[in-house]
Image (spheres, rainbow, N blue to C red):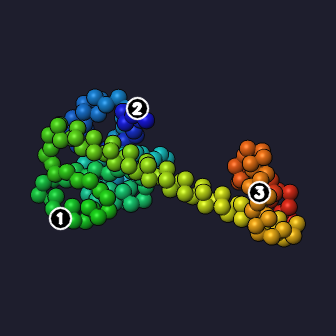
Amino acid sequence: MKLKQRQYNVLVVSAQPKFNDSLNSIIAERRHIEYEVQTSVNAARRRLLDRSFDMMIINAPLPDEDGVRLAIDRALGTYCSVLLLVANEYYDGIFERVCSQGVYMLPKPLSAQLMRQALDWLEVSCERLGSIEQKSVSFENRMNEIKLVNRAKWLLISVQGLTEDQAHHRIEKMAMDRCVPKHVIAEEIIAMNDTGD
C-alpha cells in the first residue's frame, strides 16, 4: 500500500484560531488527511470516547490544561502518533517528561515548512504503529487458534481415547483433506464433543 493512499484521521486540540487557520491550509494540501479540531482537553477527551484517531496534534497551552497528560495518555494507551507543540521556553522541561512516553514535540513558533515535515513524521509513525498493531493482532489470533486446537485435542483424547499425537494428526489430516484451517476443524470438534463442563 502506498503511503499517500491511506486515509489518516487527525484530532487537533488547539484553542488558538490563528494556528488553526494556518494548520487548516497545510492539511488541505494533503487530501489523505481528515481532521477535526477540539478547543480544550476536556472536549478532546469526550471526543476520544466516540472515535479513535491515527494522529493527534496538541497545541499547548489549552484553556483547561496544558495538554501534556493528554499527550502521554494517547501515546501510551493507543496506536496514535502524538505531536505536542509548546512554547520554546518550556520545551526542555516538558520534553524530559514526554520523550520516553513516545510523544513527539516541537517548540513554537514554528514555520509552515516545519509543520509539513512534522506531518510527514507523524505519517511515518502511523505506518510503523499500524504494522506493530497488525503483528499484535496476528499474534493474538495465532495464540487463540493454538488454544482452540489444544482444546479440541483434549476433547479427542478424553472423549475418543486418542493419544495426543493421534488427536493432533487427526485434526491436521481433516484440515488438509477439506482444505480448511485447523481452527475450523477444532471448532467443529468442540461443537460435537463439548459437554459444557
Q: Give the residue type that dot 2 points to.
A: Gln
Q: Quadrant of the N terminus?
A: top left
Separation of residues labelled 3 and 1 (CA atoms): 59 Å
In the picture shown, does residue 171 fall above or below 28?
A: below
* Location of mark 3 (residue): 171
Residue 62 tag number: none
What residue is shown at x 37% (from left), y 53% (from top)? Answer: 42
* Whether label 3 touches label 1, CB < 8 Å: no
- Residue 61 visible in image: no
**Residue placed most toward the observer, 18 or 147:** 147
Q: Residues within 10 Å of mark 2 (few under 14, many from 20)?
A: few
Q: Give the residue type that dot 3 points to.
A: Ile
What residue is shown at x 43% (from left), y 48% (from top)? Answer: 130
User: Going from the N terminus, do you reach mark 3 or mark 2 first?
Assistant: 2
Q: Give the residue type that dot 1 points to.
A: Gly
Q: In this rendering, would 121 be left or right of 186?
A: left
Residue 134 at x, y percent in the picture: 49, 50
Q: Residues within 10 Å of mark 1 (few under 14, many from 20)?
A: few
| Residue 121 occupies quadrant | top left
* Location of mark 1 (residue): 93
Label 3: which secondary element: helix
**Residue placed most toward the observer, 79 or 161:** 161
Label 1: which secondary element: helix
In the picture shown, does residue 35 fall above or below 187?
A: above
